[in-house]
Image (cartoon, grey):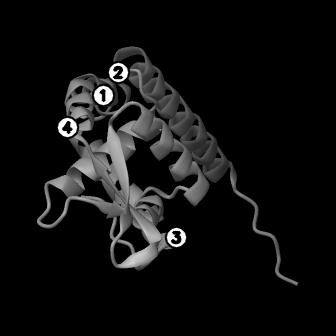
Amino acid sequence: MARRRWLDKDEQTAWRAYLLTTQLVDEALDRQLQRDAQMPHAYYGILVRLDEARRQPGEGTLRMTDLARGLRYSQSRLTHAITSMEGSGWVVRRDCPTDRRSQLVAITEQGVAALADAAPGHVAAVRSAVFDQLTAEQVTQLGAICAAIVRGFEPTVTPPG
């Protein structure tokens, strides 16, 4: 039987600080986007991914399964969000012509406009909540720390950046 390795005092302090930090940042960003853009933070992330796809060569669509995988969402969570976003006119869905089991999703011009309207306030909130608190060296360290944690979970995934 493997011996349990408990967190030492410094690890416990760091772990609790990490949990509180992520919770506070997520809450602040969600509050700001709900207040200023009438969208949850999750919808902003979906619009960003779809806008990036729109800017790439090709059809400007993403398979729902690929979008869910990239955002780390369950299929049901993404389907619920996309259904709501369709109601707002921000996205459209269509069947995939090469795979009857798949659906494609794309951002609409209304979605592009909603994202463009939301982005300045969101960036200001991110800056205020995170980067205004850090030195340039700490920003570099934060990026390296997050990349190391991501690599520990999924060695085949390249961290953003």
Disc number at residue 109? Answer: 4
Q: Amino acid at mark 2?
A: Ala
Q: CA distance from mark 4 to mark 3?
A: 36 Å
Disc 2 target residue: 37
Q: CA distance from mark 2 to mark 4?
A: 16 Å
Q: Determine whether the residue tagged by mark 2 lies in a helix, strand or loop.
A: helix
Q: Amino acid at mark 1?
A: His
Where is the N terminus found, in terms of image quarters?
A: bottom right
Find residue 155 and report its image quarter. bottom left
Q: Determine whether the residue tagged by mark 3 lies in a helix, strand or loop.
A: helix
Residue drawn at x 49%, y 36% is: 84
Q: CA distance from mark 1 to mark 2?
A: 9 Å
Residue 131 position, x and y percent, is 29, 33
* Residue 63 to residue 107: above or below: below
Residue drawn at x 50%, y 58% is: 72
Q: Mark 1 or mark 4, which has the lower sequence index?
A: 4
Residue drawn at x 55%, y 45% is: 80
Q: Amino acid at mark 3?
A: Phe
Find residue 147 and report its image quarter. bottom left
Given contact means CB atoms under 8 Å apart, are the residues at marks 1 and 2 in contact?
yes
Disc 1 target residue: 122
Q: Please name which of the two marks, 1 or 4, marks the residue nearer to the observer.
A: 4
